[in-house]
Amino acid sequence: MAEIHIEEHSSPIKTPQQLIVVVVLSFLVTVLGIVMIAELVTGGLKIDPKSSAMSEDAVARRLKPVGEVVIEEAGAPVPATAAKSAVVAAGGAVQSAAGPVKSAGGAADGNKTYAAACAMCHAAGVAGAPKAGDKAAWKPRIARGKDVLYTSAIKGKNLMPPKGGAASLSDADIKAAVDYLVGLAK
């Protein structure tokens, strides 16, 4: 019978001190590698704290919120702090983002009222609002009569809040805006 010869394996680490040195060096090499990669990626980025980009005003502009959402009861006046931000009524309808809209006073100007309270939705057709000047979309609405349009605009309809979210507008201003939109669709 032939004898089977088994080679014994040996390790280069023979003592506990050698094991400790190998473990410490493996961690040290890993940490130094990470530090070198981070330095390479950042390119030794040096920021001068006295530069104009680091001034308090510049930092505040970069950190300033883009907008805000104000949740309030339907029909409540829009607070002045909500200017240029979307206002969502309790029922989920988007109200005027232009803030409180002032009455035109005297003879109502439909174009100004439209621009201030209605254009936000009717210029782009938001939430199913008929686009200004879209004759096909306005034709069936105009066929029902202006009184129906006035009532819908003043009291609200579907996702459109009463008076387009500009509760401070008078009924005459809203009617002037409806007349302006109807005029664009004819």
Image: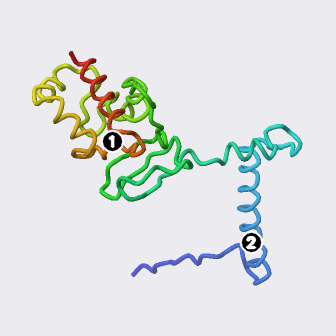
**Which quadrant is the C terminus positioned in?**
top left
Q: Residue at x 11, y 27 (%)?
A: 140
**In the figure, is residue 1 to the left or right of 56?**
left
> Around disc 2, counting alpha carbons within 10 Å, would you say few (fewer than 14), some (14 to 19), or many (20 or more)?
few
Q: How is the image coloured?
A: rainbow
Q: Position of residue 137 (x, y in %)?
A: 18, 26
| Mark in front: 2 vs 1 | 1
- Which residue does the numbered mark 2 point to in the structure image? 22
Q: Residue at x 10, y 30 (%)?
A: 144
Q: What residue type is disc 1 on? A: Lys
Q: Position of residue 152 (x, y in %)?
A: 22, 40
- Which residue does the numbered mark 1 point to in the structure image? 163
89 versus 126 height, above or below: below
Q: Position of residue 183 (x, y in %)?
A: 26, 18
Q: Residue at x 37, y 29 (%)?
A: 114
Q: What residue type is disc 2 on? A: Val
**In the figure, is residue 60 to the left or right of 156?**
right
**Which quadrant is the N terminus positioned in?**
bottom left
In front: 54, or 170? 170
In front: 111, or 131? 111
Q: Place residue 184 in its image quadrant.
A: top left
Q: CA distance from mark 2 to mark 1?
A: 77 Å
Residue closest to the far bottom: 16
- Mark 2: which secondary structure? helix
90 versus 162 height, above or below: below
**In the figure, is residue 132 to the left or right of 138?**
right
- Mark 1: which secondary structure? helix
Q: Place residue 185 in its image quadrant.
A: top left
